[in-house]
Amino acid sequence: MTTSRNARVKPAALRPGATLAVVSPASTPKSELVHQGIGRLQALGYRTVLGKHALDRGPLYYAGTLEQRLEDFHSAFSDASIEGILCTRGGWGSAELLPFLDATLIRANPKAFIAYSDHTALHSWLHNEANLVTFHGPMVAADFAREDGVDMASWRHSVEGDASWSLGVGDGLRVLRGGVAEGVLEGGCLSILAEALGTPFAPHIQDSILFLEDIGTKPYQWDRMLLHLRYSGVLKGARGIVFGDMCQCVTDAENDYLERAIMHSLRDFDGPIAIGLRSGHVGTPNVTLPLGIPVKLDLAEAGNPQIYFLDSAAIAHL
């Protein structure tokens, strides 16, 4: 099967010495955690620029007004000295920015954008409107501030633009349904993706390997939101599905129940299904995933599940 999808724009690689903007498009972070995370980034060799409003408090739970958060986001893209953009934390607020984002500005200044959680809304917008590869990965206060908050191997592979690498059992991956599929990796936080359906900012899932994760989400809620994706037609565009680590959703004792709920909801989905990938809301080192990159999901061997990240040229035959 072929697709007319154009290869996504890959931002410049981020290597030690690169300058990273630190912004808060959603909720207010804890200042001390932001500075701890910045210290870790600087120890890794990066330069950092803290957004003007990144530590603002209010209105409500927001890190500044809508206009202030937009200002920081646009400034990070327009500033030629900045090579990548990291968010401090998630929370709530990114979706407010979507109707006001400057697509012309962002298309003219493609840069690495790294975040997860609420910022799934921004990932989808950057994919839909700027055709940009983005990164579902660690945030400054949420992960870089933790001593073991970042999986450095996947971080380096992802942001340095490696063409061929893989994730497997060591990254938490387990098989729920065997099989092999290829597609472009898409997805993020399930609740944010589900809430976008029916709006102009819904994700474009076509010939994709869909990654889904969340926090504080019970088995019936996973079932409910997956049903929403089914009824909306989103799952028709998925060739395989990878679920995240569920430790932030259920206890170990509830894990089997959750997996049975997922498989019940996906009983009519034919593709391979994996679970356990430690990316996003995790208490372990956070795995970075480049979204918009062609991948091969190989679940043919239950004991050796793999996600292979392919060269962009591989998109031609997906």
Image: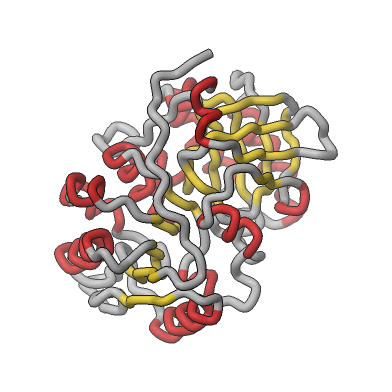
Question: Residue visible at 76% across and 53% down?
Answer: 170
* Furthest residue in direction top, as rendered: 1
Q: Can residue 224 be seen in this view?
A: no
Instruction: From the viewer's side, name the closer residue of 72 and 268.
Output: 72
Question: Residue visible at 40% across and 37% down?
Answer: 8
Question: Residue visible at 38% across and 47% down?
Answer: 123
- Residue 191 vertical position relative to residue 58 in the rendered view, above or below: above
Instruction: From the viewer's side, name the closer residue of 18 and 288.
Output: 18
Instruction: From the viewer's side, name the closer residue of 12 and 259.
Output: 12
- Residue 115 vertical position relative to residue 72 in the rendered view, above or below: above
Relative placement, left or right, of 117 versus 52 is right
Question: Residue visible at 60% across and 27% down?
Answer: 182
Percent position (x, y) of residue 54?
30, 74
Percent position (x, y) of residue 279?
59, 54
Percent position (x, y) of residue 201?
28, 39
Relative placement, left or right, of 154 versus 316 is right
- Residue 95 vertical position relative to residue 54 in the rendered view, above or below: above
Relative placement, left or right, of 100 versus 174 is left
Q: In which quarter of the image is residue 200?
A: top left
Relative placement, left or right, of 116 versus 57 is right
Percent position (x, y) of residue 276?
68, 48
